[in-house]
């Protein structure tokens, strides 16, 4: 087996920013950020959706829109194409 060709497989802290949920798992993802969790420092990977915030696991419908896609759609098409805008006006 060749040496020094495999990625660094280590414990990484994943942080769900939408629900402020953190969990540790092993990964090869590289990141510049670090965070202390339970007295130990881990590489930090920020995610938008995890089992704590996903509608399938929570049973709640929640719009996750960090890129402003819904607002861009409403600006482009107005209230004509948006079902949520129609529901709000009733």
Image (spheres, rainbow, N blue to C red):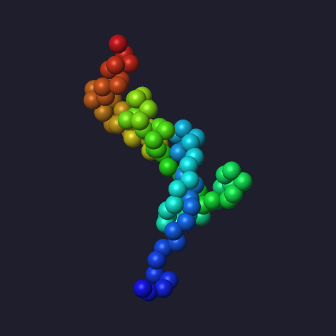
Place of residue 30 in the rendered image (x, y in percent of width and height, measured from the top left): 53, 66
Residue that sits furthest to the bottom in the current view: 2
Left or right position of 82 against 62: left
Judging depth in this view, the residue of 26 and 53 nearest the camera is: 26
Residue that sits furthest to the top in the current view: 90
Looking at the image, which residue is at 31% across and 28% down? 82
As drawn, 63 above or below 49? above
Name the image quarter holding residue 87: top left
Which quadrant of the rendered structure holds the C terminus?
A: top left
Residue that sits furthest to the front in the current view: 1
Looking at the image, which residue is at 66% across and 55% down? 35
Which quadrant of the rendered structure holds the N terminus?
A: bottom left
As drawn, 73 above or below 86? below
Looking at the image, which residue is at 46% across and 77% down? 6
Place of residue 20 in the rendered image (x, y in percent of width and height, measured from the top left): 58, 41
User: Is there any visible trace of residue 71 in the rendered image?
Assistant: no
Looking at the image, which residue is at 47% across and 37% down? 53
Judging depth in this view, the residue of 44 and 1 nearest the camera is: 1
Residue that sits furthest to the right in the current view: 39
Place of residue 75 in the rendered image (x, y in percent of width and height, measured from the top left): 37, 34
As drawn, 9 above or below 81? below
Name the image quarter holding residue 19: top right
User: Is there any visible trace of residue 70 in the rendered image?
Assistant: yes
Question: How many labels sit on residues?
Answer: 0
Left or right position of 61 against 42: left
As drawn, 13 above or below 90? below
Place of residue 57 in the rendered image (x, y in percent of width and height, measured from the top left): 41, 35
């Amino acid at each position: 087996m060749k040496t020094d060709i495999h990625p660094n497989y280590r414990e990484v802290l994943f942080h769900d920013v939408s629900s402020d949920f953190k969990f540790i798992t092993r990964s090869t993802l590289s990141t510049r950020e670090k965070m202390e969790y339970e007295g130990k420092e881990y590489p930090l990977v920020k995610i938008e959706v995890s089992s704590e915030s996903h509608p399938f696991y929570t049973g709640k419908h929640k719009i996750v829109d960090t890129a402003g896609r819904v607002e861009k759609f409403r600006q482009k098409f107005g209230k004509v194409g948006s079902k949520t805008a129609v529901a709000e006006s009733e």
